[in-house]
Image (cartoon, coloured by chain):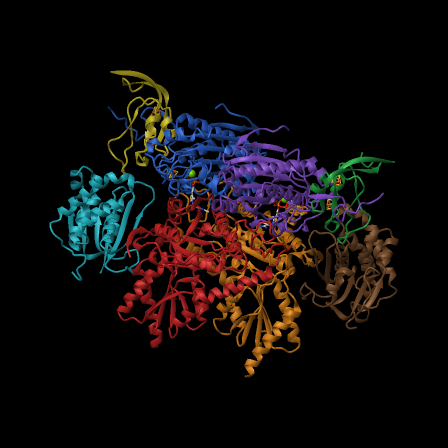
Chain colours: A red, B orange, C green, D yellow, E purple, F blue, G brown, H cyan
Amino acid sequence: MSREFVEGAEALARAAIDAGCRFFAGYPMTPFTEVLDHMAEKLPAAGGVCINAESELEAVGMAWGALATGARAATGSVGQGLSLMQESFSEITRAELPLVVFNMARGQSDYFQSTRGGGHGDYYHIILCPIDIHEAIDHVHLAFDLADHWRNPVQIYGDYLLGHTWESVDLSPRPSAPLPPKHWALDGSLNGTGRARNINSLGMTKGAKGIDPESFWNRLQGKFRRIQSAEARIETEFTEDALYIAAAFGTAAKFVRHVVREMRREGYRIGYVRPITLWPFPADAFKQAARGVREVGVFELNGGQMIEDVRLSLLGDAPAVSIGGISSDTSGFGVGSLLNTARIREILERNYARVAARRAA
Amino acid sequence: MSREFVEGAEALARAAIDAGCRFFAGYPMTPFTEVLDHMAEKLPAAGGVCINAESELEAVGMAWGALATGARAATGSVGQGLSLMQESFSEITRAELPLVVFNMARGQSDYFQSTRGGGHGDYYHIILCPIDIHEAIDHVHLAFDLADHWRNPVQIYGDYLLGHTWESVDLSPRPSAPLPPKHWALDGSLNGTGRARNINSLGMTKGAKGIDPESFWNRLQGKFRRIQSAEARIETEFTEDALYIAAAFGTAAKFVRHVVREMRREGYRIGYVRPITLWPFPADAFKQAARGVREVGVFELNGGQMIEDVRLSLLGDAPAVSIGGISSDTSGFGVGSLLNTARIREILERNYARVAARRAA
Amino acid sequence: MSATILTRGTVTIDIALCKGCELCIPACPIDVLTMSEARNDRGEHYPELAPGCTGCGACYFVCPDFVFGIYEYETPKTISVPEGAAS
Amino acid sequence: MSATILTRGTVTIDIALCKGCELCIPACPIDVLTMSEARNDRGEHYPELAPGCTGCGACYFVCPDFVFGIYEYETPKTISVPEGAAS
Amino acid sequence: MSVIDTTRPPSEPARQKWDTRPKLLIDGDHDLCPGCGEPIALRCMLEVIDEMGLSQSAIGAVGIGCYTALTSLLDTDMVQCLHGRAPSVATGIKRMRPQSLVYTMQGDGDMVNEGLQEIIHSAARGESITCLLLNNGVFGETGGHMTATTVIGQRTKNTLEGRDAAYHGHPISMTDLLTPLGGVGYVARSTVTTARDIQRTRRYFRKAFETQVAGKGLSFVEVLTMCPTGWFLPVQEGPSYLNETMSPVFRIGEFKVDGQIFTPGA
Amino acid sequence: MSVIDTTRPPSEPARQKWDTRPKLLIDGDHDLCPGCGEPIALRCMLEVIDEMGLSQSAIGAVGIGCYTALTSLLDTDMVQCLHGRAPSVATGIKRMRPQSLVYTMQGDGDMVNEGLQEIIHSAARGESITCLLLNNGVFGETGGHMTATTVIGQRTKNTLEGRDAAYHGHPISMTDLLTPLGGVGYVARSTVTTARDIQRTRRYFRKAFETQVAGKGLSFVEVLTMCPTGWFLPVQEGPSYLNETMSPVFRIGEFKVDGQIFTPGA
Amino acid sequence: MERELLMTGIGGQGVQLATQVLARALTLEGRYVMSLGTYAGSMRGANTDTSLVYADAPISTPPIVARAWSAVAMHHRFWGDMKSKLAEGGLLLANAPVVERDGDVDRFDYVEIPAVAIATGLGAALGAAMVMIGAYARMTSAVSIDSLRQAMAQSLPPYRQKHVASNIAMLEAGYAHVAQPLHSAWEAAR
Amino acid sequence: MERELLMTGIGGQGVQLATQVLARALTLEGRYVMSLGTYAGSMRGANTDTSLVYADAPISTPPIVARAWSAVAMHHRFWGDMKSKLAEGGLLLANAPVVERDGDVDRFDYVEIPAVAIATGLGAALGAAMVMIGAYARMTSAVSIDSLRQAMAQSLPPYRQKHVASNIAMLEAGYAHVAQPLHSAWEAAR
Ligand SMILES: Cc1ncc(C[n+]2csc(CCOP(=O)(O)OP(=O)(O)O)c2C)c(N)n1
Ligand SMILES: Cc1ncc(C[n+]2csc(CCOP(=O)(O)OP(=O)(O)O)c2C)c(N)n1
Ligand code: SF4
Ligand code: SF4
Ligand code: SF4
Ligand code: SF4
Ligand code: SF4
Ligand code: SF4
Ligand SMILES: [Mg+2]
Ligand SMILES: [Mg+2]
């Protein structure tokens, strides 16, 4: 294993290219811009195409077209740009195209947007949320594989810290399984045979008039359920005998994990849980990890979003209490004052003490 | 009270005009088109402006501008068109503008989109979800009032049935309270004084460089919490001694309520709960209504969305089980085969029997 | 009361597909199409061909419902048509 | 070594605002602006005025940082300037 | 008057010159209205593709409008796109498969309203695709509403008194917008009201596809089509209404050929 | 050489002819880069509004770009719009307050990329608003990326080898697109590289606002502005780079006055 | 008291308008009504049907009627699809002979009205649905002929007011064709 | 063993590049490194600072460093903001005399390096940050001068390779300026 010192955004871009991504389109918006820049620079050399799309709407449309030909393709933005893509996200999901989305979020306030699907209709994207760039590189490879496997969009939920932190990471080429056959990809070969392909999100069938959304969407629901049972991922530490669990996701979890480890070393009966996939949320594993726990503190840098999934996992087994909150720097990039191990230590100690006291009483 | 026989879409449009709406912009999409058509026909006569916007994005932008002048203004679409408006929805909410949105949904699959905010960031819209056109008329008036009161967008979650059903309804003009003073509305009067107004979603302050998103967004969180405790609305029937409760929302609830009443008359210990506001979700009242109940069946015409809010309300007090499902006609307008009292009766009987048996055991 | 003309082909008419829009009627340069009295299964009138078709294809091109087919005779032939039809 | 010119006004320079872009220097038609040796609180050089300003306003218009103010004398006055400055 | 039996081929030795429907159409039995101009234009395009020997390489990207009902009958590989977004999708396809013949099919509501930005950007980008605009001046699909190409004075569902320039604005001519753009190779407009017009439309399609094959930039063909339903007219009056109200505003002809702008004879 | 004391007004009797900053600007101390052309154009606009006696009626709608940092310093009523959306917002304002002077301020990224559709539709709709385009040929704010107006050959952050027409497409000229539209009353382009250019810019703004006051349709002024940071140039070279690379592509002059199109002297 | 009426026919038969006239007449008499129409797209010749619920108190029934008290069948082509919704013994007014007689005669209170003939007699076969509504009003005493007349005038847009008189004639002819009420809408039980 | 280094200066001082060179050198020696830089926008003269964490095993510390083992202060203007993060007794290399001496002398292991003078002596005042990094490497034994040389070459883009030699001279001068290591980065405890 050889390591190089690179910035997160570059690592993401190079991992994507190594994973076979051959089309990328995006519109600049910090901190997604940095990923786009690396793609614009490096993808053509790898025989791919990177388009500086004129807007987010056009970017996702271009990716859609590239995906339809069977190529591994991706787009991305920050939450705000992804808002513009919601119509396309919903329909690309129904069209069962393996889109990969780089969400370089400005903080953690877009949890609902990512996990509940901000678009219309019933659909879900697999949301991989790395804690650091080492994991992110794995996730990028995983994302393209899962997208192809499930024929469903996969999002990498990153952020400013992920994109801007430099680390010595292993970016050596990974052997990758051959792409699954894509019988549905467009190449014109069946034209005129009565069986030309039709990629659509409406439940159209070649040669048949009209659409059949009900059975089409129900079939997709079945797929979502299968993904839910197959793809949930979680990281837990010290949960066996914990009185109190601190839960967090993404780069913020690295701060929490650091403090929890510190407190454990000092004898606190505190545990740590991090959903790695935000959707499917690892509900069963979370419930399992929280067995016997008195309270779960949810540290998320927003108004309270993941806490709903925590509560839905625990269903009253233990109370879930919000211990994070909105936190932003003045640039709005989401690196706010709560991203501070000293403050987190103080928060965890205070909450732990309260819970421990309650137990004693 | 004099009643007229009108189509739902017309009733919505006339109620909006009666409520003082003076600007409307929209882009056609069935079944929102019908509301837009009535607005285009009737609003100019009332001294207002209705623009046939060239797209949903432009429609919401125009409404934004009209709102900034202090006018009561609205837009709308179906879930798909609303997907395109998500960026604007998020930011209009942060700019604290009193937008009213007519969501003439194609069914119930857009519950998450409406209640969780499909856009980026932490924000909520008040979602009023009428069961029929009588209630919808009240809701339209309420929507404009709540929007002005809270300076927050309010959505009417209607659908095809609401828009296309004709009823004999009371549309006589309602006396309405004078509009609240809008010191923030733009009129140029303070220009050049150093205190000209600035409507923005970023936390800009006149004369100050830069932005302060953290305190700005935190202030909004406080508002959302106040709305949550003040505006949750619910309808319940027969819950006092119920073994089993059927929950539903919107026009689908009318079918469920009908069947529950029928079964009550026949002696079943069954109750009925309908959240009238989807956000804020009437969690406390729901929990109260479900006290002593063995199970809550959630009948929603989607892959399972409101059920999360039901579970979050009950937190394990009673299991919530999905008894609806995706249901669509071949036009995709959402009037599917589950909207059938006989089928619902069959579903409720089956579930009731199971729960009753469990109790006996 | 009749004349002879040279024709290079003729048409087939798949009346089941016809929606009765009548676009083909003025399109025919020699006016040999008229709308039927009878209705097809869709409940529509449809074009009927009087003698004299030259196989020019005008009706074929203007029909939105793909009702016409055009056949070209191996050897052009002369037919007699009622006076005026070919005017 | 000096000449006289007629001038209708002059400038004020709010050096604190200057970002040292030097756009004003070539803008001055009579070359009476030069960049300072010293730096302002932003750490930038800023323009200094040599005698001869006519109050024409060119520097005022091109400056992106609103550094200049223009004053018009009640009566135009004649001043002497070093030879060459007004060329 | 005698009626010829047209249910079967003639008894004389004859060869089928044109089949009832184009080879790239699976079924001619579609749900569009009587007298609709859209299937006529579609036929032209499909036949030209076939005649040029490009059937096996065509990939389409179709917008949302009445023509969407034809997507599943079209026998070329297709993406059914969202309303307004076909040019971007076509861009993605073409960039990944430069060897394919990539076409889009959009209505005026789709292209000139919802997706105006996409077509202009794709054109300026010089994407090597062929874009078909079916312009009937209304949203046919929603029941006859004003679009960005509705002519002044035209009555539609939401311009009940006729489109008023002062209130509803002016129609947009796509050929005006696209012609000056650097990335555009071919621009033309035609109609389908008569067999002659249809022949011209076919000629324009051929030139448009040739432009694509030669890599000379984006090629654009606008076809004015009848929409008797959306115009609230008897079906028979579609062609004359088109010729009298739309053609004067939207000039017929070629506006740019091989990247060279020229003003066609009026 | 003697240095004049310019920290205070002259001792001779004199009146202040031009204040350091325009009356409609709260503070001149902004965060834009040294040598940026945007504040220069902004000053022109604000001064013209003031000179025309329209200060009390102006309402602005501003896009997202470097100029956004000026929004809170502007002393007219404002809406800070989303990227690309200002023309629609301005439409809503103007329709509800026809008596107000409504202006938009957008960059090339904002108007020609993200919001191309909005400006064209608003123009065709003939909205009585005045739209300012600050065209520096890059996204300044994101650090110098290609926009839809970047000229061929220009090196930007994502066209490291220079914009290549075949790969990245051709620049779009907004005056070309807007001039032929029916709803447009006034179209002009200028720069801010010299005091003379700036005077012309001021003249154009005056005519644009006169067009709005007279209700003669949408008025549009494009100003080419220096962006030394986004161009990766020493600040002093901004004006000459602009004159040498942008001006030849984007012609200076008036293209439409009082709704009449004309070709300006080159 | 809540009563349901299903009406079914093919496009262009005036089923939508006829239902509206009846609904408006009921509204004029202070009744509560609710109606939902569907017709399949723009294709001519497709089915069109309407449901109408009317009552003497606010209606809580959902708009998609599962079981109807009465029905009017204008055309046999699509009547079959609706049949299952009419309650056993319910009132069925059939547009004879367009609607063909079959087993329905036994299952329902089957009344044939030669509506096309009556309408043709008045000069416009297209008025058959109006004839049926007139007959239905008389048969059920749901509403008076006066209210129907008034409702008719309200149901046509200004530019079509010249057709009001001929349509009222249709209503009257249908009303007159029925000798006496059979099923009373407002009677508690049958 | 995890060590933190904070480096702070003003825009244009080369702080970012210096941090990168050190990080790359550490990477070349098989260490794990993590670094985060911030600088406030495009305004010249704004602060720029970097944090670097380096370790002999994968790093689990979060990228925003709360408490640092060592610091390099290039300019007094922004050093004050960072001061609180340096651990009591931590190593502080100060760019003297640009950074002014104050109470810090007592709280930290305060070492003054006349980096500007050294860099100016080598012909380019802008190289001061590189001098500091050279000095830091020697002072802490974090990394060898060889690795720094190699890292330098890797850190400049092709079109700036001509500056490699002069920058290496800066590193070497800084390295040479420190007589002997004081704080060993890789020693278990101090
Ligand atoms: C985002 C979005 N908005 C609105 C619609 C509704 N819609 C469907 S078709 C259509 C109009 C299509 O008009 P046009 O493209 O001109 O095609 P035509 O029906 O005239 O053939 C509209 C507005 C939609 N499908 N998607
Ligand atoms: C929807 C959306 N996408 C992307 C961005 C990021 N963004 C902010 S400013 C900007 C570019 C602005 O360019 P321009 O309008 O030319 O202004 P300039 O910075 O050059 O003055 C971009 C892409 C955004 N704010 N919103
Ligand atoms: S043009 Fe075609 S559809 Fe129309 S009448 Fe003639 S054959 Fe029938
Ligand atoms: S082929 Fe020509 S001549 Fe024959 S029917 Fe058709 S249009 Fe007439
Ligand atoms: S133009 Fe203005 S900011 Fe630039 S150097 Fe001159 S005074 Fe300073
Ligand atoms: S006012 Fe004119 S003459 Fe005076 S310094 Fe400025 S540019 Fe020069
Ligand atoms: S509505 Fe118009 S465009 Fe649509 S199918 Fe009918 S005629 Fe054609
Ligand atoms: S980046 Fe360019 S446009 Fe932005 S402030 Fe700097 S010079 Fe001006
Ligand atoms: Mg159309
Ligand atoms: Mg720009």
Which x, y percent locates residue D50? 28, 24
Position in image of residue F58 (x %, y %) = 50, 37
* Residue in the foreground of this view, choosing between B71 and C32: C32
Where does residue D56 sit, x and y in percent of width and height?
37, 24
Residue at 71% across, 52% down: G43
Question: Which quadrant of the figure contains the N terminus of chain C?
Answer: top right
Tell me what residue is drawn at x 63 percent, y 37 percent. Answer: E201
Q: Nearer the viewer, residue F226 or G159?
A: F226
- Can the viewer see residue A220 in this picture? yes
Q: Quadrant of the C terminus of chain C?
A: top right
Q: Decide which of B66, E20 is in the foreground and name it.
A: E20
Count of residue discs: 0
For residue G7, above or below residue B179: below
The picture quadrant for ligand 3 comes to: top right
Task: Point out the residue furthest to the bottom here.
Answer: B361
Considering depth in this image, is E177 or C4 the residue closer to the camera?
A: C4
Using the rendered image of the protein, determine whether residue F99 is visible from the camera's viewpoint. no
Residue B237 percent location from the top left of the image: 60, 71
